[in-house]
Amino acid sequence: MSFADRAAGYLERVEQALDARLPAEGTRPATLHAAMRYSVLGGGKRVRPLLCYAAGETLGVAADRLDDAACAVECVHAFSLVHDDLPAMDDDALRRGKPSTHKAFGVATAILAGDALHTRAFEILAGDGVHAAAERLGMIAILASATGSLGMTGGQAVDLESEGRQLAVDDLEALDRDKTGRLIRAAVLMPCCAVPGLPGATRDALDRFAANMGLAFQIKDDVLDVEGDQALTGKTQGADAVRGKATYPSLMGLDHARQRADALYADALAALEPFGGAAEPLRWLARYIVHRDR
Amino acid sequence: MSFADRAAGYLERVEQALDARLPAEGTRPATLHAAMRYSVLGGGKRVRPLLCYAAGETLGVAADRLDDAACAVECVHAFSLVHDDLPAMDDDALRRGKPSTHKAFGVATAILAGDALHTRAFEILAGDGVHAAAERLGMIAILASATGSLGMTGGQAVDLESEGRQLAVDDLEALDRDKTGRLIRAAVLMPCCAVPGLPGATRDALDRFAANMGLAFQIKDDVLDVEGDQALTGKTQGADAVRGKATYPSLMGLDHARQRADALYADALAALEPFGGAAEPLRWLARYIVHRDR
């Protein structure tokens, strides 16, 4: 059985794990909790949780030891989408095929729901007493570093500053390595904390895989913004162009953007060579990331 | 020497500790980092860090073991002020005697600076390898629980929902116990994690002290909004009334609000009785909180 057959099971698993780790429906403060659940559940490709479980398979870490890491990284991702969609930021009305959170709940509640999901990510990682404290602390450090001003949030800040300006491809890659890449890398690196004594070279190889795939993922996102089907992506089609955002297709053309994604994909696969068959789950996901239509 | 004589030293200490734990000036992304530093440094009463150090003195935990906790709770406090001041939230133009962060840097950067400070709080607690992992994990759990949807952020959500509505005093107290009280309690409870085997009763007594002072602090804030001097408070005078916000003075009159704060202060002091002279730092801070003019 390949990872393709197990992916559906993992998707169901992460949906249940997220549901269990979010405030229950109807609990107070009810509007805030509804907005948190709306922002996370019932949509999303769950690429980061899947990467987390796939890295776990490659490293021999059981899925039930990675539910918290998978949910934490997805909560950070969801919080960033809620805040990025705000009128003062990317001003996007559509997300995961539904009205974005501020459209459904208002701007104030969206800001607070994002904040609460952000906190929840770290609370999830801190809260479980099952695993060794040092292991969880390592995961928290990785996720925080990936999320903060030198990671995802810093990348989004540079992205906003760059709107309407001419960017070089290198600059765009640098900001996307932070904005998108750091969280993808965190998803793959957190499982490493669950393997005591893991060789540095093993961790570095997984990091190289993830760094390449993080950028390939963003390039594919930009390509889908041009040629994708809004019914599948669940996002406003052509939004980047409307905002005058530098994207890979706008800077290098669609064909070259696709070629760049393919080259990153190839380098990601090369990084997995030392793992042999154990890395099949990560290979499957990498193929999905560059070939997806949503 | 009483805590009054040491307070100035602690204020200097926390200022330096915060400075060292924030991204250095001029580092990239420069605007985001400038906004983070602007939102935290050079202002603020530092009540939460002082409570952290004072609780440390009472428990016999040295200050250098609490710098991270003190800075983390202040980073969360600063992030909440930045987000609460946003146009979609309380829409406040003045904070700590300066333009609020979104007035100085724009709304998008303010949202991201708040997010990055939020992350930084947990990164600070996770990052130091000096202390036992379980200790730090305990502090992270306390801070996250105080910050999230059942703590500060939840309180702010209820506060926003309540604007323009008639509230009972009990409802207002309940929301303020979350919005303001939870972070005050976290400041006092985090040092407890640094004392292995601390009796539950000791922790509970400190928690009772902090819960009472958290509410007294908010009542005093509301009183200062009516009768305070804007030059001292650094906040827009009368902003609560303009927004039609329920406050203690508006619900029960100024005199009764002051009496309620005094009663909470008395109960806070009663909670400290078992500590004898060791609790002098917390008593001094409690007196400051109810008698301050800013």
Image: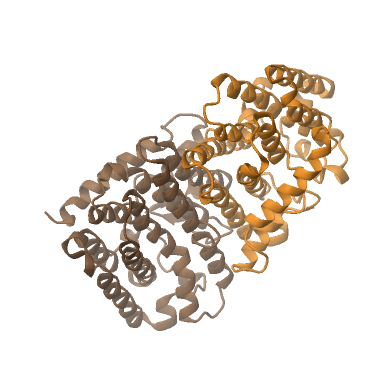
Chain colours: A orange, B brown
Whole-percent x, y for residue B55 in the image: 28, 56
Left or right of B21, for residue B29: right
From the viewer's perspective, is residue B56 above or below residue B173? above
Front-most of residues A156 and B1: B1
Q: Residue at x 39, y 50 (%)?
A: B74
Whole-percent x, y for residue B13 in the image: 27, 43
Left or right of B216, for residue A274: right
Front-most of residues A77 and A67: A67
Q: Residue at x 48, y 54 (%)?
A: B80
Whole-percent x, y for residue A7 in the image: 79, 39
Left or right of A273, for residue B274: left
Front-most of residues B264 and A160: B264
Q: In the rendered view of the protein, which quadrant contains the C terminus of chain B?
A: bottom left
Whole-percent x, y for residue B251 in the image: 44, 81
From the viewer's perspective, is residue B59 above or below residue A213? below
From the viewer's perspective, is residue A206 above or below residue A13? above
